[in-house]
Amino acid sequence: MNFLKLIKNFALGAFALAFSSVALAQDEESSGPSFSVSGSVDTYFRTNLSGGTNDASDTLGTLAPGTSFANNPGFSLGMANMIISYEGEKVGFVADLVFGPRGTDAVFASPAPWNTVNQLYAYINVTDNFKLTLGNFNTFLGYEVISPVANFNYSTSYMFSYGPFSHTGLKADFSIGEHWNLVAAIMNPTDATDYNPSNDYVGGFQLGYSGAAGSAYLNAMVSEDFYQLDLTTGWDLSESFYLGFNATTQTNFNAAAFYLQGALSDAFALGVRAEYYSTTEDSAGGYGIAAEENVFNLTLSGPIKVGSLKIIPEIRLDALSYDGYTDADGAEGSSLSSFVLAAVYSF
């Protein structure tokens, strides 16, 4: 039995003991049950400005950057997202359901009909500073997330697209003082959300700081043949300007990105993402670009808020270190520019 399996067995025992302790200590929820329903709907239009064809039937043409979600030509669908949650004094659950291409791509390791489940977990507040979560939850690594509601840019980065999306396992959250938190988890292999297909396990860790001006999180995942170290941080430069930074190194790639955003009014903002991403020999060309190559991605987004609706016009440039794009005439090139107009409604 390896070290991660020993941790898994210990963690499951601790979860059962904590649940028993909470059940014995709790009579009734003093505040009563609290149910909520939230979610979003998103859709978009996308076209290439140069460097590639927009005709999906043309197999010679490179249609889009090798990143997730916002990569179909013409008028395209994102997803409908519905989150049902219950929050009690000590216990609660989240059921997060997704429908549509973005949702299916996010839960790509799950067969139908389970590819509608984005998150499904229950939790126990053992104490005010100690929480246990069991089930399927979105990753705590990285800057970007699956739902477009929480992202400034509509299209996604390479490091997000080829990092973990979700985990299934047992996660412990600890509050350490006023500003610090610690997370430790034992999980199935990354994105194996329904069950463990290999009987292997992954350890996950996070040390985080959060203050009035910003936050910083040092994250890690490790298994027998895989590792990932991740730094995610963001700070308010002023009342109107924000700077985020994400850097990741792992078995298959290395990447870093800056996110500079400015609120020009209550309804309009501008932001730029600048990302450098390079693959290793171990990637074998399966991580968006060829193995041992790199790409620079520059994305300018200008979200416009109209009530609960957000309109996001976006211009994106991807520059490869090799000729990896082809146009409708079969001509090869190293750069691709594109335009996206997205609509995201949240409720």
Image (tube, rainbow, N blue to C red):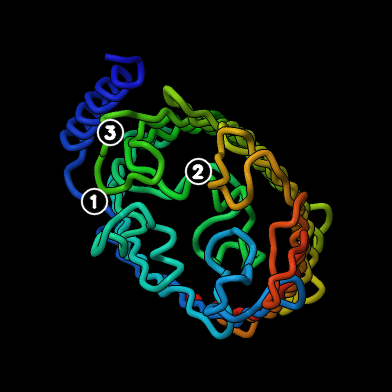
Q: Residue at x 23, y 35 (%)?
A: 22
Q: Residue at x 69, y 63 (%)?
A: 325
The answer to whether 274 is drawn above or below residue 270 in the figure is above
Query: Which numbered disc, 2 or 3, marks the residue closer to the eye?
Result: 3
Q: Residue at x 43, y 26 (%)?
A: 223
What crowding class fits label 3: few (fewer than 14 Cα within 10 Å), some (14-19), or many (20 or more)?
few
Residue 307 in sight here: yes
Sequence-wise, the earlier of marks 1 and 2 is: 1
Label 2 SS: loop
Sequence-wise, the earlier of marks 1 and 3 is: 1
Label 1 SS: loop
Query: Which numbered disc, 1 or 2, marks the residue closer to the eye?
Result: 2
Label at residue 140: 2
Total marks drawn? 3
Q: Determine the image quadrant of residue 44.
A: bottom right
Question: In the rendered image, which residue does mark 3 sit on?
Answer: 198
- Disc 1 versus disc 2: distance between alpha carbons? 29 Å
The answer to whether 119 is drawn above or below residue 24 in the figure is below
Question: In the rendered image, which residue does mark 1 sit on?
Answer: 29
Pinpoint residue 296: horizontal percent, then vertical percent.
76, 53
What crowding class fits label 1: few (fewer than 14 Cα within 10 Å), some (14-19), or many (20 or more)?
few
- Disc 2 versus disc 3: distance between alpha carbons? 23 Å
